[in-house]
Amino acid sequence: MRKIKTVLAAVLSAALLLAQGVAQNAPPAPVRTESELLTVLRSDAGRKEKADACRELAIRGGQEAIPVLVPMLSDENLSHMARYALERIPQPAVDKALRESLAELRGGNLVGVIHTIGVRKDAKAVKPLQTCLNSSDPEVARAAALALGRIGGVGVAQAMLKRFAGAPPKQQLALAEGILNCADALLGGSQAKAARGLFDALLAAEAPHQVKTAALRGAVLARGKDGPAFLAPYLRADADVTFGSALRVSRGLAGPEMTGVLIRAMKDARGDRKVLLVQTLGMRGDRAATPALIQILKENDAAMLKAAMQALAQLEETEAVPAIMPLLLHPEAEVRSTAKETLGSLPGPEVDAQVIKLTTRPETDLQIIGMDLIVRRRMVGALPVLLDLARSADEKVRLAAVGRTGELAGSAGAPEMLKLLLRARTPAEIAAAEQGLSAALLKAEDRNKAAGLAAGAWSVADVEQKMALLNVLASLGGTNALQAVRSAISSDRPEIRSAAIRALGAWNSAEAAPDLLQLAQSATDPVEKVLSLRSYLALATDSDLKPDARLDMCRQASALIKTPEEEKLLLSTLGNVSTMPALKMAQAHLANAAVKEEAANAVLRIAEKLLQARGAGKTAKPIIEALGSAASATANESVKTRAAKLQEVARAKAQEP
Amino acid sequence: MAAALAVPVIIPGTALGLNGAVPPSGRIVLGGIGIGGRGTGVLNWMLPEKDVQFVAVCDAKRSQREAIKIMVDGKYGNNDCATFQDIREFLAERTDIDGVLIATGDRWHATASVMAMRAGKDVYSEKPSSMTIAQGQAVVEAARRYGRVYQTGTQRLSEANFTFANELLRTGRLGQVHTVRAHIAPWDAAEMKHDWLPAEPEPPKSEVDWDQWLGPCPWRPYNSAYTRGGWRGYYDFHTSCIGEWGAHTFAQCQVALGLETTSAVDYQYVNNASGDGMVTRFENGVSMVLQREGWHGSCGVRYEGTQGWVSVADGYARPEVSTAAWMQDYTKLVNDYIGRNQRPMSHVRDFFNCIKNRRTTVAHPVMMHRSMSTVHAANICMWLKRDLKFDPRTEEFVKDPEANRYRARAMRAPWII
């Protein structure tokens, strides 16, 4: 019997796989011929069937389809789909038919046909479309302007330009688009003079800022090599919007002429504009700007110094390094940090050599910056330099070198870092060594093995060093680290036990949660009990945990809570769990006067997230109810208002079809 | 990680909307169009930015615009967020708005972007940011013509893990790169649905403006499921399993290869439902393979060269690499990228910085259009069930009139651009 069942199951599985295979590799649905599609259109088939036929004719329709589709243009229900097909049929007969239909159509059908004529660039339609520009229907006039722009031509553009000044705002934008389209086409077609006339006219007209920007760009491009000079006064314009447009245009113009215009524009510009001009020099990537940018480094305007260094970084200009070095000690912190970052990102061995020189300078601050840059630039070859500095007589330098060595050396340098930790005596030395050891071990491919290295030093470490090792283990996580921390919890030294609990609370994942829960349940020392509970709740905020897991942790913690402060902590954690059971749990705390405000806040936070989820309408009723309870419980007026607004959202969601 | 270097407030964004009038503060005035679930997520990234003030939302659906108003008013502690039903009125009336977040469904992204840019707004548009090659061209043209700042929502271009992977490639550590692999969504198919859901009574326009919700797409009867996210998988509204994630991953690959201003030229049809395994090829000979599996996170990419490989997807603590030692250079490479390009590791921050200094964004219109053209061409290859060749210069398929007809779709009036 079992054998029969097995065979049957195998046959069914095979059949299922076969069926799936058939579904995945099903033969394509037969492509309908043009003739079949036209039969559908000529029949009394429904709107859907005819729409589908039009969609296919857009790809495969030809001459035969035109007389069938054209009468549909006046059909309110099918006009768009008729155009959907006609617009893509290349035969010239389509253009003729569309032109002829213009006189017959009104409203949306007419707007659509005008648009399609524009897409097809039917030059023979210019005259009737110009008539449409005068239509009393603003949508028709707008569509005509857009279509004429696509068709193009000097005469067409001039006709639109005449109407531009007196046109209502909504039509003005369409006319501008039409004129600009014509002018761009003329420019691309080597009729720069005609294009220039159109751009200049728009530039001189009263027009929205974006139209002026477009006109300025065109006017500059139409002037060819004279463009940068034409742009120069606009970079000195009073209006910010004009300056901004000119700046944008300058970014698209390559060559030293434009670079020169930008540099000269800085002369009289106000401070904030100077910064933008400098940024533009960086973005344009023309190294002709280098001398001017280096010159700025000798000035003392913090914003300009920063902008010039950033521009030099974009140009990857290593010539600037000697001029940047003094700025590492500039009085303004932002200048110092920009100088450091610029030196960090500039490429090349010459820059490496300059950085190493920094570590030999008498100023401690410069030595430390040099070490930072060695790490930032990943100069692994300079590791001996850092190890030398780790033995410096200057404590500040020594401590800095220990931390940086760990960062640069990676896990291969971990044994050296461990030795430094075990030699460390002062709190500062221990902290630096802990930082270095963590940095080194966190780069290990096998963190569990790395934790074994740290744990192996336990027996020879003193109390302070052990506390540092616990922090290192918490940052690494994993079973070896957890085992080592568990051993520490059984220490007879209370400070080590507390440090071990804190280490569990700072664990890099929720894997330490069961240990903390057990401690919170069974610890005999009340301080350790509270510490364990708080650390447990801290882990429950881990965003990698699924909401149900976080809720479960909140429930476990709830059973152990003794004081209102702990209850508040629980509610704060619960507020991050966006599930209906979490909402109910938070709601249950509203009755407790000592924590009602925190409970109300948690209810609102959960409700807000639930309402943002897809399908929130289904749970709107209990959400509205919970928000009502929160509003009644709270004494805070802004919470009441927020609850009422969220209730409105929930009601709207509930009514969604 | 080095913080993004601060960009000074120079041209107050609002000045652009007020034709030169300088407002009291240098804040960027922001509005939203079609902010649903995804848009809310992006808005949550944007609202904490201190120099941004969100002032108005436009949505065809009342419940959605009300929800955003409540969220925004709650954030600012006022009742000031205005609501609009009609996108045309919104763009015409709010001349004070500098930039808009567009997070409608795919069907509206490009059309709304072009309308907004012609109205003088800078644009952050969610992806996939075009439905056709022609729509992508229109976005590029509007941004170029009107000098608008435009960012497409391929936010992984501003994330450290993905930046590191790109920098490994750029700095030559992978050797000669011959193949890149782009994750496509492991659900849905390349072939999309044309059926209509059963008609439901159309709600009043004030509740759901169905005509506007459909926008330039073909009409179909109202069904509430569409407006609750159920538009995915329909030909009229979606860009298939290839566009769903390819909008991100093709962009990632093309930027990494320095090919963001072109598109793939060869597309090899694969006989399955999704396009999984399709090999596309760029002019320089590098292959990009569409792949549904192979990562343990979403939107993954993998770059393979003669010296090694790197693979990364969402949720990776760090990228996976063939040579562990490369990871030692993680911070350096990311910081070098930031220093060299002055780009923050925050996609929305990059958009706001560019609004202020009028710079081109990291996910600029040409990059969007060219990578989406690769998406569209891959889809068309699957729909026609044959190999295709595409010429990125003419933006036409080579000797294939049928494929060329797929490059555009007629827009429904009055939602024309």
Image (spheres, coloured by chain):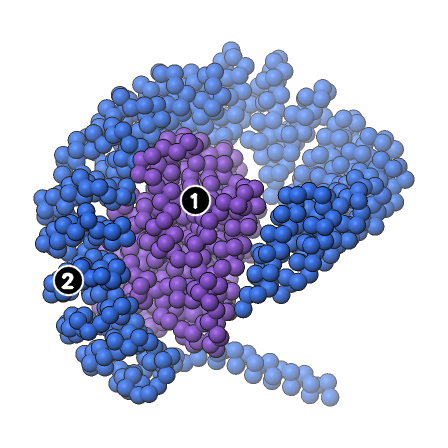
Chain colours: A blue, B purple
Q: Is residue A421 above or below residue A514?
A: above
Is the N terminus of chain A in the top left, top right, bottom left or bottom right quadrant? bottom right
Residue shown at 20%/33% (left/top)? A231
Frontmost residue, A303 versus B183:
A303
Determine the secondary structure under disc 1.
strand
* Residue positioned 41% across, 81% down in the render: A27
Q: Eyeballing the image, is B387 above or below A633?
A: below
* Residue at 39% across, 60% down: B108
Real-space Cα distance between discs 1 and 2?
Answer: 39 Å
On screen, residue A461 above or below A30 = above
Would you identify the image quadrant in which residue B219 lies?
A: bottom left
- Name the outermost residue toward the top: A362
Q: Could you tell me how many numbered marks the image carries?
A: 2
Between residue A536 and residue A617, name the one nearer to us.
Answer: A617
Left/right of residue B260 with respect to residue A377 in the rendered view: left
Read off the chain for label 1: B
Locate residue B15, reporting x and y percent.
Answer: 35, 36
Compare residues B123 and A163 and report the one nearer the observer: A163
Label at residue B30: 1
Q: Where is residue B395 shown, x and y percent of the image? A: 25, 59
**What residue type is disc 1 on?**
Leu
In the rendered structure, find residue A131 and report the number of the disc placed on it.
Answer: 2
Q: Which mark is residue A290?
A: none
Q: Residue furthest front?
A: A136
Instruction: Determine contact: label 1, label 2, CB under 8 Å.
Output: no
Q: Depth-wise, is mark 1 or mark 2 nearer the camera?
A: 2
x 51%, y 50%: residue: B69
Dot 2: chain letter: A
Q: Is B147 in front, or is A587?
A: A587
